[in-house]
Amino acid sequence: MDTICAISTPYGSGGIAVVRVSGGEAIGLVDGLFRGRKALTDARGGTVHHGTLVSGDGEMIDEVLVSVFRAPHSFTGEDTVEIACHGSLYIQQAIVRALVDAGCRTARAGEFTQRAFLNGKMDLSEAEAVADLIAAQTKASKDVALRQLRGGVSSELEQLRERLLKLTSLIELELDFADHEELEFADRGELNALADEIAGKLQQLTESFRAGNAIRNGVPVAIVGATNAGKSTLLNALVGEERAIVSDIDGTTRDTVEDTVVINGVLFRFIDTAGIRETKDTIEQMGIERSRRAIEQAQIIVEVIDSTKPQPMEGLPEEKVIRVMNKGDRLRGTGYGLRVTGYGLRVIGDSQLVISAKLGELGDLRERLVEKAALPSSEATMITSARHYEALSRGLEAIRRVKTGLAEGVSGEFLSMDLEECLEAMGEVTGKITSQEVLNTIFSKFCIGK
């Protein structure tokens, strides 16, 4: 493979930056530009060296620390060098130019991690977890990604896959001796027990996708209600900035507005929707249609009702709804039966919350949102990738057909087809079975330098 290089720290100026180089010629190429007490080609792996880095014409670029990692004991499994330099954009780019002039190629997005996968340093699900770990916005999303990076999902699937592969090979051996109907190499009882175990595990993992996806991307929360109920004011108060236009004019919000915020360690993705009402305005109608789609896709629905002129919505899925009476500050002293809780306002003897989005009295609503999200412990094994969900769903369907076939006594030929499909689905998750197109799609989503 070519020797590749890229800046591995975020774009911009900072105290330090790191330029990574990986490939068979990595140590030699960097050594040609490095001036230190000893040659890098003589350095042991896992050592750090102080010196200066020069351009091809000998001009000093920067004072640096160079870390040397020798194959296979590196992130990529190849000889790797990491150059820590001062974080000037000019210095970073000058080092990359010097490396390219010396014979390196600039890395593509995710190419370092792709090489780690191709060199057997990690399987595909673990490689995808690297991107999730980089993008983690909460402790929960970090814990889930770290668990997957350490093989939480792949190790379980691989153990099941190896056992199923053994039984599948025995069934296929029976097909080679089809003329001898009395021969049976694969124990049907053992196969049935294993099919039960695999079906249970695949069902558990596919069901975990909803929670895993919410931890990774945020719990989707639709803020809905009649026009001018204070939905946009509530969104702005929740996220702490003016994300949506606020006006007393009905129909101001004509499209969905989204933003995310972390509440008690849980990432929420709030969607402010257009007020749903009868209108002949074509653009407003489009916004209302998007509001209906947001309601369908939301895990939680916050229905905002103007407490001064309540107009509740009809037909909302009650199991998803948190109902709030907004503009509670206007009701103080009206005998409406309110009390101050220390977090905000709450109706006595009623499950509805009374809030004042204008005054930011949202403490009780935040607590209710976390309760309603009901996310499992981040220590649980779960999947967060739609690719994994799709593959494991196919595997689950296939293993269920195997169970049905065993119960009905179908021939090994048909069992073998469904077993192969289940094996292929599990192999797609870990990368045992995958195409170059899939790999290119996955790693293209990574940042350059990782």
Image (cartoon, grey):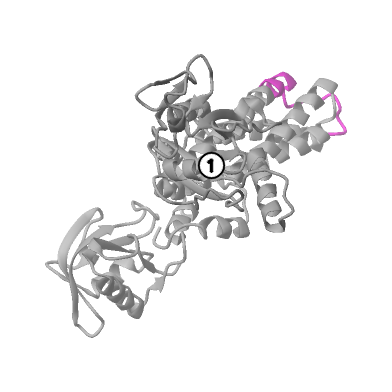
In this view, the residue farthest toward the left is: 37
In this view, the residue farthest toward the bottom is: 57
Number of numbered callouts drawn: 1
Is residue 190 in the magenta section? yes
Q: Is residue 58 above or below residue 115?
A: below
Q: Position of residue 245 (x, y in %)?
A: 50, 53
Q: What residue range appears in magenta? A: 178-193
Helix, strand or loop status at disc 1:
helix
Is residue 151 in the magenta section? no
- Viewer-proximal residue among 340 and 130: 340
* Majority secondary structure in the magenta region: loop
In this view, the residue farthest toward the front is: 334
Q: Is residue 272 above or below residue 30?
A: above
- Circle 1 crowding by C-alpha within 10 Å: few under 14, some 14–19, many from 20: many
Identify which residue is drawn at 55% across, 38% down: 221
Query: Dot 1 corresponds to which residue?
Result: 231
Q: Is residue 152 above or below residue 228?
A: above
Residue 146 visible here: no
Question: For the residue marked with disc 1, what is the amino acid?
Answer: Lys
- Viewer-proximal residue among 214 and 317: 317
- Viewer-proximal residue among 220 and 192: 220
